[in-house]
Image (tube, rainbow, N blue to C red):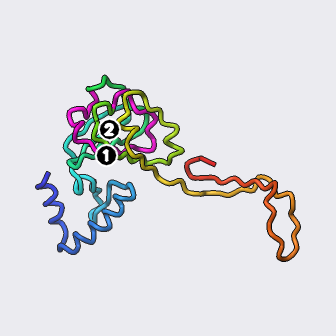
Amino acid sequence: STEEQLAFRDQFSSSSAFKNWYLAAKQEYEDNQNKVVVGDGNSVDLGEILNPSIASGTCGDDLSWTLSKSGILTISGSGAMNDYASTVSPWANYADDICKVELPQNITKIGKNAFASCSSITDVYYAGTEYNWSSVTVYGGNGNLTNATMHYHEAILTGIAVKTLPTKTTYTIGESLDKTGLTITLSYNDGSQ
């Protein structure tokens, strides 16, 4: 609520102290750490301060959802999303307001017709890589989601391994590397190679 937000802000000794905390906290939020710890050790959900929710609920055994005033539908948790009839997803009453969807890396299934009535979706932000996304099952009736612009986290290179050496391994000064026969494997943090 507005009163709670103002009470939280009043905990700071000055507006510059709040601004410094806000900038640091915003960076943490952008790094996908929605909760930040304040001086007294309590955690605060920065998302609620920056972008308050208007509705929330569950959408799977271990999945929940929150819709912000700015039209961002955030799915949190892990596992499979429930299936729905075309107009009864839990956020169907807000379908015209949803313009962006945020999905966790550990989601395994997008339920049937979950986004059937959400024709205003322009962007989907998936917390995993494109390789991870290929393991998510997206059931029918979700064209509004799959036709939106997808945003993935980039895979990070974690290893390089030489599988086979090149055919030629001895060189004289000035001679160019002959890569014939050389096989290198690149490993990434998402399990892809």
Up-down relation of residue 8 to residue 92 (above or below): below
On the image, the x and y values in percent for residue 46 come to 27, 56
Q: Is residue 98 magenta?
A: yes
In the rendered view, does 115 fall on the left or right side of 158?
A: left
**Could you say which is closer to the camera, residue 183 or residue 22?**
183
The residue labelled by disc 1 is 100
Give the amino acid type for the residue marked by disc 2 in the picture: Ser
Residue drawn at x 23%, y 53% is: 51
Q: Is residue 65 visible?
A: yes
Of label 1 and label 2, which has the lower sequence position? 2
The residue labelled by disc 2 is 64
Count of marks, rendered view: 2
**Could you say which is closer to the camera, residue 74 or residue 176?**
176
In the rendering, which numbered label is found on residue 153?
Answer: none
State how far apart marks 1 and 2 are (Cα): 16 Å
On the image, the x and y values in percent for residue 191 come to 59, 47
Element on which disc 1 rests: strand
